[in-house]
Image (cartoon, rainbow, N blue to C red):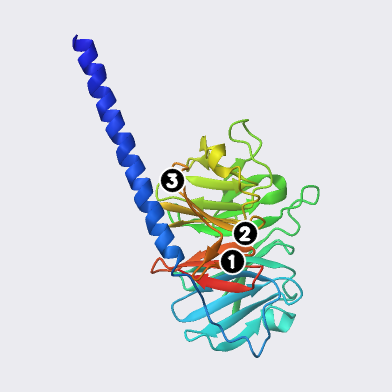
Amino acid sequence: MMRKMIIAVICVIFGGCAIMTNLKAGEDSKYLKAKNKEGAEVILDTEEIGKPMDLRDFAFSGKYYFTLEGGSKKRLNLFDGLGNYLISVGSTPAESGEKEAFKFPSDMFYSVSNNVLYILDSMARKVHIFSPDGKFLNTLYDFSYDDEENPFYPSSFKYNQTSGFFIMIDTYNHRLLETDSGENVLMTIEGTTTQDGSFEYPQAVAVDESGNYYVGAGNKIKVFSPRGEYIFSFPLKYTKSISNISDMEFWFSKYLVVTDPAGGKVLFFSLTGDLLASWTSFGAAQPFIRPFRIFIDQGEKLYIIDNGTQQVIGF
């Protein structure tokens, strides 16, 4: 009799927890649906330089807007806080401040703590540092001669706010590296170390408040501890509709935002892998064509960089 009572209590407790979880997911889904309707293009005056040809990334310092172009232009564009064009750098050696111009700038992030821009040049296998007004300061990493047999190909470069170090995704060597400002590799997550934790051709990474790494490769999302130990994978039933992940970021520390350019989608997951929302359009039903990168500013405003429409959409 007592055993039956205990089982009944456990069922009530866990049943209640399941109901609370479902209610919370429902609230998050409603919130994200409402935010989607607020989406609007960030208007930047590009009349002087023409429409972007291959918009790769975007950032906002609070004073300046920045856009990064790959393709034939290969440059960093600066705009003031009103969206007025100021200058472009990087398309020629003189503009970039380096001996060579950008080969293929593919990723960037603005560091609030030291007020600089980090520009990843994937083809040159380098990371350059620029001041917010577009002046070249230094080259932080140069892996161009690191390994000729298995050349380093960084596709993503980010700052780990939890550890205070940098993260690089080396796509073709199937690995994630955490490095310091002295170019020392502190920790590596090899994609082929274990069957459960394996991944191939990673493209994106995000770090939660506990320092856990969320690695995006293809349509899979795998989670690792700050020490690189495999924890779990997102359920296939939620990720099987993803074509290929290009970027990931945490929004309000609780939503994992994922861009799927081939599928034309922006997806939102909980930290445990539940799919909360899938955006295929924004605002007044304007479609995403190729949502490629994500930027979240200091005020937690979300920006989606659409490489197909050459637009930056703010939420």
Report the amino acid beneath label 2: Gly
Q: Is residue 171 left or right of residue 268?
A: right
Circle 2 — which element? loop
x, y (%) of residue 63? 45, 81
User: According to the image, label 1 marks what residue?
Assistant: 287
Circle 1 — which element? strand
Q: Is residue 264 above or below residue 56?
A: above
| Separation (CA) of disc 1 from disc 2 | 8 Å
Please, which residue is most extreme toward the front here?
Answer: 285
Q: Quadrant of the N terminus?
A: top left
- The residue lying at 71 percent from left, 84 percent from top is 94
Precedes in sequence: disc 1 or disc 2: 2
- Image quadrant where residue 146 sits: bottom right
User: According to the image, label 3 marks what residue?
Assistant: 271
Q: Nearer the viewer, residue 22 or 45?
A: 22
Report the amino acid beneath label 3: Leu
Neighbor class of circle 2 (other Cα within 10 Å; few <14, some 14-19, many 20+) is many
Neighbor class of circle 3 (other Cα within 10 Å; few <14, some 14-19, many 20+) is some
Q: Tell me, yes or no, if residue 239 can be seen here.
A: yes
- The residue lying at 48 percent from left, 40 percent from top is 225
Neighbor class of circle 1 (other Cα within 10 Å; few <14, some 14-19, many 20+) is some
Please, which residue is most extreme toward the left here?
Answer: 2
Please, which residue is most extreme toward the bottom here?
Answer: 48
Q: Nearer the viewer, residue 6 or 129?
A: 6
Q: Nearer the viewer, residue 228 or 288?
A: 288
User: According to the image, label 2 marks what residue?
Assistant: 264
